[in-house]
Image (tube, helix red, strand yellow):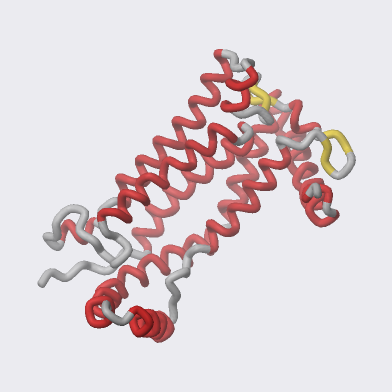
Amino acid sequence: MDLYALPPIAALLDGAHTVLMGLAGLLEPLIGVSSAAAAVVLVTLLVRAALIPVGISQAKAERDRARLAPKLAELQRRHKKNPERLQREMMALYSDEGTSPLAGCLPMLIQAPIVGIIYALFILPTIAGHPNELLAQTLFGVPLGSSLAGSVVAGTLAPGAVIVFGVVIVGIALVGEATRRVFALRPDAAAAGRPAGAPVSPLAGAGAVRVLGLLQFITAVIAVFVPLAAALYLFVTVAWTLAQRVVLRRAYPLPEVRTA
C-alpha cells in the first residue's frame, strides 16, 4: 500500500510542492538555479517562526521541571521501595503544579511530519499524478533529491557534491556540539558551588547527560542518508533551535540551585 497515494496525504504533498515551486519561481530572478534550495530554507524559517509560541511553552516546561527537581528527588528518596506509590505521588505533584513530565514535547512531535513531507517531496518521481519538478532543482549543481549515502553507493559522488554535503552535515554537527556545550551545565549550578555536571534533576545524571550529548549528533547522521533538501531543513532547524533556546533561557531562567 502506497501511503503517499492516499488522497489526504497526496493533497498535502501537492500543496507543499506548489508552495515550494511558487517560492522558487519568485526567488529565481534573485538567486538563480539554487532558488529551490533557498525556498526550502525560507519555508523552514517560516515554520520555525510559527512554532515560536510552542518553543516558549517548552522553555516554561523546562523551567518547571528544574523547579520541581528537588521535590521529585525527595519523593524518590521516600518511596524508592514502592514504585507504584512513587508514580502516584509524582503524578499528583505534577498535577498540583499544573505541569506534566511530557510538557514541551510538542515541537518534536510537530517537526517529524514536516521533515517527512520534505523528505517525500524529494524522493517521489510523481506527486498527485504529475511529475515532481523539484527533483530537477539543484544547490550549487547538486540535486536536492540526492543524498550523500546514496551518491556514495551509486558511485556518482562528485567533488563539488562532497563540499556541499560536507558543509551541511558538518554544520549540523557543529551546531549540535555548540548546543551540547551551552546547555551541558546550568550556569546557576556552577555559581552555587555545585560540582561540574552535578545533576539538577532525577533525569540529569551522568548517564542521561551522555545520552543527550549523543543525541545532538544523531541529526548529523540522519543528514547523511536523507535528501539534500531535508538535510538543509535539518541544518536550519538546529541552528534556529540553538538561537531560540539561548534567548528563551534568558527570558525564562532556570531556578537558582540552593546549596545545603
- Above or below, 163 against 97 in this view is above
Tell me if I can see residue 156 in this picture. Answer: yes
Residue found at x 89% / y 41%: 129
Residue found at x 27% / y 81%: 79
191 horizontally vs 181: left or right: left
Number of numbered callouts drawn: 0
Q: Quadrant of residue 125?
A: top right
Residue 43 drawn at (x, y percent): 65, 45
Residue 46 drawn at (x, y percent): 62, 49
Quarter of the image for the C terminus: give it. Answer: bottom left
Q: Quadrant of residue 204?
A: bottom left
Residue 220 drawn at (x, y percent): 48, 37
22 horizontally vs 186: left or right: right
Point out the residue furthest to the top here: 159
Tell me if I can see residue 15 in this picture. Answer: no
Residue found at x 29% / y 54%: 207
Residue 244 drawn at (x, y percent): 44, 52
